[in-house]
Amino acid sequence: MYINLLELDYIQKIYIIILSLFIGSFLNVVALRIPKGESIVSPPSRCTSCGHRLGWLDLIPVLSFVFLRGRCRYCGDRVSPFYAVFELLALIGAWILYDHFGMNWEFPVGFFYICVLLVITITDLKYMRIPDKIVFPSMGAMLLLRLLIHPLPYWQYILGFFAGGLLLLLIALVSRGGMGGGDVKLFAFIGLSIGLYQMLLGFFFACLLGSIFGLIFIRLGIYKRKSPIPFGPYIAMGCFVAYLWGTQLWEMYAAVF
Ligand SMILES: [Zn+2]
């Protein structure tokens, strides 16, 4: 019996690794094509340099990139490591979630939440946008999921949704374009996904990370002082941390003050 249980755990982990890598690969496609109004199923993926249609051997998440040494098999041009990095991030996210929740119903909900955060990170880095076409369907799906699976009381998610949207709307109005409409809808989605308290903490972390990295990147000359800085990656990082460790952090805070 003992061995069977171990084996089960082992198989689950392999399954999670493979599935999350392929989902990560799919997220790249969603994030790069949806903002351009393209279909996510056709045309098939092509090399961005030579336009050669990519076969399944070129599309194995992470491994193709490693075995082809980051080059296109047909023209030898460099392939952006971007795709492999986001495939790996999907894997790392799934792994941390599995470690945190185990095979609990919150695991798939949390993984969906992380997938949305990854997609908006890519669209914000690539196109400086958090598209409605991604946020609105995600909201609808999350609403259904939260009706069924809700570790926190319902009011947390409902208030999270309205407070998240309202908070960012106020900031957007005050900052006059510093914060976009995409951020407003995204925070409504985040509040709906993780609840009021976690969302507020996530917002705080996102601002903190954004300021720290913003200053570092301006110093290094990666960001220009006056040009807009994509906030999406910091929202994703901050709200990922808040989702998983928010409750403990709130308790620590309450214990200190
Ligand atoms: Zn090529």
Image: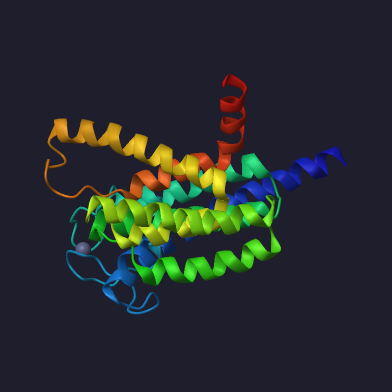
Q: Position of residue 56 (x, y in %)?
A: 40, 66
Q: Position of residue 255 (x, y in %)?
A: 62, 22
Residue 24 seen in the figure: no
Residue at the image point whose x is 25% and y is 52% from the top = 80
Q: Nearer the viewer, residue 66 or 31?
A: 31
Whether 237 is drawn above or below 183: the answer is: above
Ligand 1 occupies quarter: bottom left
Please give left or right for residue 68 compared with residue 200 in the image: left
> Residue 48 appears in which quarter of the rendering?
bottom left
Residue at the image point whose x is 43% and y is 47% from the top = 88
Q: Nearer the viewer, residue 232 or 6?
A: 232
Please give left or right for residue 166 compared with residue 123 in the image: right
Residue at the image point whose x is 30% and y is 55% from the top = 172
Which part of the image, by quadrant, shows the N terminus?
top right
Q: Position of residue 28 (x, y in %)?
A: 37, 61
Whether 127 is drawn above or below 96: the answer is: below
> Residue 158 appears in which quarter of the rendering?
bottom right
Which part of the image, by quadrant, shows the C terminus?
top right
Q: What colour-coding does the image apply?
A: rainbow
Residue at the image point whose x is 71% and y is 44% from the top = 9
